[in-house]
Image: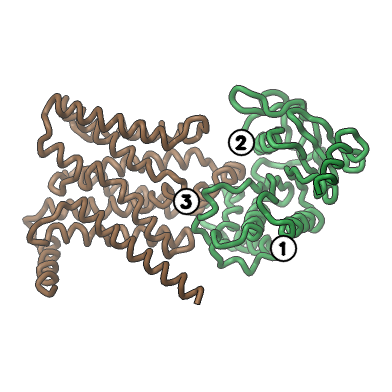
Chain colours: A brown, B green
Amino acid sequence: MTTFLREYTQGVYDILIMPEYTFMRRALVVGLLVSLCAALLGVSLVLKRYSMIGDGLSRVGFGTLAIAMAFNAAPLTVSIPAVVAVAFLLLRLRENSKIKGDAAIALISAASLAVGVTVISLTTGMNTDVCNYMFGSILSMKEWEVTLSIALTVTVLLLYLFFFGKIFAVTFDESFARATGIRAGGYNMVLALLTAVITVLGMRMMGAMLISSLLIIPPLTAMRLCKKFRSVTVCSAVLSVLCFFVGLTLSFALPRGLPTGSTVVLVNVAMFLLFWLLSLLKVRRKVI
Amino acid sequence: MALITCETAAFGYEGGTAVRDVNFALHGGEYLCVLGENGSGKSTLLKGILRLKSPQSGRVILGDGLRQREIGYLPQQTVVQKDFPAGAFEVVLSGCLGARGIRPFYTRKDRQQAEQSLRLLDGWELRNRCYRELSGGQQQRVLLARALCATKRLLLLDEPAAGLDPIVTQELYQLIQRINCERGVTILMVSHDVNAAVQHASHILHLQGRQLFFGTVRDYAQTQVGKRFLGEGVNAE
């Protein structure tokens, strides 16, 4: 145990200090910012029963990345607009009660994955690039992705700081919010847009299969113990950043080298289980 | 001038009209109860008045200087709210948002208004509780306080007693009566509880795909529709 801790601390030290690990610091910055934004947006998504949207969007992201690679286009310039478009579409379907939202997401998600896999096997074949897109790679962070994630974080933080009350109102009770003159539709659009961008951005690091966990798990964990919207939001953001940091450094510092995406998810799951246990204990104490 | 006037208004969903030929006027201080069976267009009418839905024909006119944002609304509870992690006071306070416009933060005045509303409904001790841990009646109390924050003049209630037991229902009706009498807030309540309507309301609007009756409670009891509905109510008990 002590050897493990020593190695881990040394690893963390390396990442933060060693200048030759530029890619690592990029991954750290992008990852922390993406985790922060994802956790904030995730609170609204989970509470509005949109949990599957992140999952669906990441599959669409994967499909479009495959197409972009086939045509030698810059991956994200194709992916981001496509995923944003699908996010708006899903939102529309959700508002139209005749088509069930979850079925639509499942349909789009399966279709995109199938398109992606087909296009890949027709062109490049299942190479490392493809594997990286599916399960993530911390090596792939580019300079402009750092810029994009900083811009996105600033937007999300400003939004949550200045419109917190309205985000609460729209999440808690959309028809009341509309009736009192809040433009709920507008807030939903912004939420969908930001979720789409976060999904594509995070997909590079976490992988298409795992990115939705960053949106969903931290809010769920926070909800085990927190009982107010404000505390759930803050707790979710803090947990997400913490779990990402631990996950990333673990994956890098351990001698074997674990895949980053799955390690982060596992740390998140462990945190969820911990909070769940704590909530059970709390209930029991109340009963006694 | 009436607060709300409906002129031969019709409302519906895509591919169908839920209710048509609605003609009524609601004046300040009145208590109007909209009666009708399930699917008779009651909730659709409410959405029309709130401009969440535009009329297919006819007009809904707000009068007496009433602005759209000054209408308080108690919607039916959704599944989403049942387990929502929110503080009761957080919920009440969110009623002040409509009047707040683009200002980002709550003011001291907003907080005072939220406190007053909650106290009026004997719900002040609920303020630090978690919304999802409240009983059905307490949740309605909190939502009613929120609606009160949004209005001083007109409150629209959509089946406020749905899912509540008889005693809590009675308490809720008394609170609504109190809002009507003490605050002078005009009430428009959708319900299918005929007996409670006759007991508390001043006017009745009876819908069944179209308007069957509009007038005072006393007149309602004399009409064919009223007699039949009231009779049914008595038999059912």
Query: Dot 2 corresponds to which residue?
Result: B52
User: Which residue: 64% across, 44% down?
Assistant: B69
Q: Chain of mark 3?
A: A
- Residue B34 placement, left or right of A184: right
Whole-angstrom CA distance, mark 1 to mark 3, is: 28 Å
Q: Chain of mark 2?
A: B
Query: Dot 3 corresponds to which residue?
Result: A163
- Confirm whether circles 2 and 3 share one chain: no
User: Which residue: 33% across, 66% down?
Assistant: A274
Determine whether the residue tagged by mark 1 lies in a helix, strand or loop: helix
Whole-angstrom CA distance, mark 2 to mark 1, is: 29 Å
Amino acid carrying label 3: it is: Phe
How far from the left and from the top, in percent, is residue A260?
Answer: 18, 52
Q: Chain of mark 1?
A: B
Determine whether the residue tagged by mark 3 lies in a helix, strand or loop: loop
- Residue A275 placement, left or right of B193: left
Whole-angstrom CA distance, mark 2 to mark 3, is: 22 Å
Q: Please give the label number shown on residue B120.
A: 1
- Residue A83 placement, left or right of A181: left
- Judge the density around disc 1: few (<14), some (14-19), many (≥20) Cα neighbours within 10 Å: some
